[in-house]
Image (cartoon, rainbow, N blue to C red):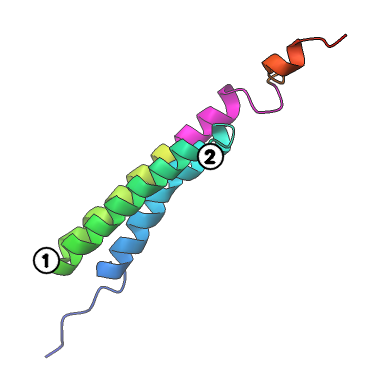
Amino acid sequence: MSEPQEDFNAFNSWDCFGASLMLGMTPALLNYVFNHHEIVSTVFLAAMGVAVAVAVLLVALVTRRRLIGYVVNMAGWVLTLVYIGIAAYCWLYLPGPMSAPPAETPEQSETVR
């Protein structure tokens, strides 16, 4: 009699946490790169990503079901494609930081005589 074969590709609780953390940090990274290095919204998005990853970890630790690993894995596939599409769109169609003229501050616009 043979034992049922173990699926080595299945996610355990900590794999779910790591994958959801990486998926949650990607919007923060994309925001930082394509939004002229704005810190406030990047930190907010990163905090939201960490909160979602911790929630996924808690659910995965409490339930101990393999279904959560499969859901996180499928969400990773879908979100990876979405993030690649968003990054390609931002790269191609949004103006970069070098294309925008430098903003004048009120102190610079006044001439001193």
Residue 32: numbered disc: 2
Q: Residue at x 36, y 43 (%)?
A: 79
Please tell me whether mark 1 sits on a helix, a strand or a loop: helix
Type of amino acid under label 1? Thr
Q: Nearer the viewer, residue 74 or 105?
A: 105
Q: Residue at x 84, y 11 (%)?
A: 112
Q: Residue 105: percent from the left, percent from the top?
A: 68, 18
Please tell me whether mark 2 sits on a helix, a strand or a loop: helix
**Residue 97 forms part of the magenta stretch:** yes
* Left/right of residue 40 with respect to residue 76 in the rendered view: right
Q: Nearer the viewer, residue 23 or 77?
A: 23
Q: Residue 39: percent from the left, percent from the top?
A: 52, 40
Q: Residue at x 55, y 33 (%)?
A: 34
Main secondary structure found in the magenta portion: helix
- Quadrant assignment for the N terminus: bottom left
Residue 63: numbered disc: 1
* Left/right of residue 75 with respect to residue 45 in the rendered view: left
Number of numbered labels in the structure image: 2
Q: Is residue 96 visible?
A: yes
Rounded to the nearest angstrom, the CA distance separating label 2 from label 1 is 35 Å
Q: Are marks 2 and 1 in contact (CB under 8 Å)?
A: no
Q: Is residue 84 visible?
A: no
Q: Which residues are magenta?
A: 85-99
Q: In the displayed image of the protein, which residue is found farthest to the right?
A: 113
* Left/right of residue 3 with respect to residue 41 in the rendered view: left
